[in-house]
Amino acid sequence: MPTPGMDGYVEPWRKPEHDDLAELARAFFTKEVLPHAERLEQQGHPDREHYRRAGELGLLGLSIPEEYGGGGGDFTHEAVLLHEQTLAGEGSLGIAVHSGIVTGYINEYGSEEQKQRWLPGLVSGELIGAIAITEPDGGSDVQAIRTKAIRDGDDYVVNGSKTFITNGILADLLVLAVKTDTSARAHGISLLICELTGDPEGFRRGRKIEKIGLHSNDTAELFFDDFRVPAANLLGTEGSGFIQMMQQLPQERLVIGVGAVAAMQRAVEMATAYAKERTAFGKPLLGHQNTRMVLADVATRTRVSRTFLDDCIQRHARGELDVATAAMAKLYLTEGQCEVVDRCLQIFGGYGYTTEYPISKMYADARVQKIYGGTNEIMKELISRVL
């Protein structure tokens, strides 16, 4: 059933293959993952088996070339998968990071040997990927990172720490931002691929960070104490890490935008359905003008957001999504998500503030969208530079 206010709307980039993918993804999330939702919330991280099952179904690495085991598609296929995950209300699997970000770094900047070595495992779900940039002393100011990697023979010796790392508890493969030249800022940053299977010497996972939302998705602290990484695991060239991140951040912000719009659509669907069945003062909530006005507002905001998102997706598929437009998408769509979910929760009244209804979880989950991937304040700064 289409989202209220979205009747007849079809994404301009959508093809029958996207519909087939959506159906497969929806079945996977609703039938194989969601039945375990309560347990996953309690354990605070997803099951490895769900990553493996997603890989078995061909749902990981959708935009990775087929020669590395991927789907051979493009970002539109990743967008469909992430949209269906959010629309289903599944929040444990960090696929947005694993497939939407990590595989992209390796595919874009990795050598042929590196691609052959790591991409098949990520695509199959045998390896779980994460990216570590944020540190305890800062996040948005990427140039100021302190974790350093000093070359020692055939290795880099890494010392430092990272925090708020999505997939950090389960990660087998880590894209790690380090300073290989501590005297430089942007030009001193490099990216290393760290193999973490078995928690190797010099590496330690810290506490699983407790959050107000996204309870079933693991977020962790990572510590490096003379942790040795083979020099062959350098991604690209030394000192190119900052440029690599700046080139990949538009997609990361678009990934966040996909989840934001899907959450808006889900909230409008739930609030509209509730307003039709719940009565107050002798008639359904939808019979009250204020409720209709609220739903009209959120439905309009969602429709506008969807069309903006689809324009960005098309631009990105053509290689034309610039930094400022990606920042606009991240800013506008996540602000919209928080506003729409909040107004939809209000329609539920007291029930909206209980865990009995999913809208309360959506409310808690939404808030971080304005923080990670670069805070929305930083998005405004990026946008202002082109004005």
Image (cartoon, grey):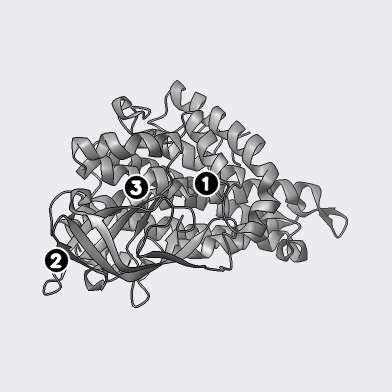
Q: Residue furthest right?
A: 282
| Rendered residue at 29%/37% (across/down) | 117
Q: Residues within 10 Å of mark 2 (few under 14, many from 20)?
A: many
Q: Kindly state the secondary structure of the residue where label 3 is placed.
A: helix
The residue singled out by tag 1 in the image is 262
**CA distance separating discs 2 and 1:** 38 Å
The residue singled out by tag 3 in the image is 102
Q: Residue furthest top?
A: 16
| Earlier-in-chain disc, 1 versus 3 | 3
- List x then y, in percent, for residue 248: 26, 50
| Earlier-in-chain disc, 3 versus 2 | 3
Position of the C terminus by quadrant? bottom left
Q: Nearer the viewer, residue 88 or 149?
A: 149
| Rendered residue at 69%/52% (across/down) | 39
Circle 1 or circle 3, nearest the eye = 3
Q: Are marks 1 and 3 in contact (CB under 8 Å)?
A: no
- List x then y, in percent, for residue 348: 73, 59
- List x then y, in percent, for residue 269: 64, 45
- The answer to whether 66 appears left or right of 367 in the picture is left
The residue under label 1 is which amino acid type?
Ala
| Rendered residue at 19%/48% (across/down) | 232
The residue under label 2 is which amino acid type?
Gly
The residue singled out by tag 2 in the image is 188
| Earlier-in-chain disc, 2 versus 1 | 2
Q: Nearer the viewer, residue 319 or 198?
A: 198
Name the mark on residue 68. none
